[in-house]
Amino acid sequence: MQKYEELLLALRKVIRAIDLYSKQLNKYAGLTGPQLLIMREISAAEGITASAVAQHITLSPATVSNIIERLEHRELIHRHRSDKDKRRVALYLTEQGQMLLENAPQPLQEHFIEKFCALDDWEQSQLLSSMQRIANMMDAERLDAAPVLEVGSYQTRSKN
């Protein structure tokens, strides 16, 4: 097997692991990875704005706005317009949202982060450099991506 074939196989295994986790998360919690990430941000900083959430999780404001609409429709979050500044809309978890978040599994990346942090600095740097180069080789460096591990078709993700 050529080295590039081995690398592509390893990438497919990573994508498959992320896909299996995403399906498990959706089955047990009824949430997608980005939805879980946004709910965790709202829980951590009650009253946060949608634009601040987008900045923290590195997703576009439009993507975050669509996800927030879906979460609000499911009555997992609610918005509150400021009395002092009508332009400011704060986000809060509902009681139902808080209960769902408490029972939801941890994002896949937390397990990854624990293992990654256990590596020596040089190895962390080597892995980071290699993945950045792979992203560049795949012309993916400008793609909208959150620090949450999730895959799926474009149509599936756009429904978040």
Image (cartoon, helix red, strand yellow):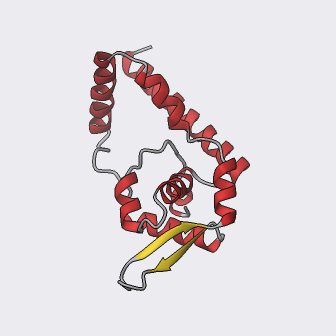
Residue drawn at point x = 48 percent, y = 23 percent: 115
Instruction: Report the quarter where the C terminus lies.
Output: bottom right
- Examine the rendering and report whether any part of residue 9 can be seen: no
145 in relation to 113, above or below: below
Identify which residue, 113 or 63, lies in the foreground.
113
Q: Is residue 26 left or right of residue 69?
A: right
4 in relation to 45, above or below: above
Identify which residue, 93 or 18, lies in the foreground.
93
40 in relation to 149, above or below: below
The quarter of the displayed image where residue 89 is located: bottom left
Across and down, in percent, residue 30 comes to 69, 55
Identify which residue, 48 or 9, lies in the foreground.
48
The quarter of the displayed image where residue 7 is located: top left
Residue drawn at point x = 57 percent, y = 33 percent: 17
- Examine the rendering and report whether any part of residue 73 can be seen: yes
Q: Is residue 125 left or right of residue 63?
A: left
Across and down, in percent, residue 59 comes to 38, 57
Instruction: Report the quarter where the N terminus lies.
Output: top left
Residue drawn at point x = 57 percent, y = 34 percent: 16
Across and down, in percent, residue 150 comes to 52, 45
Residue drawn at point x = 29 percent, y = 21 percent: 126
Across and down, in percent, residue 63 comes to 43, 64
Q: Residue furthest toward the front?
A: 84
Q: Is residue 122 left or right of residue 66?
A: left
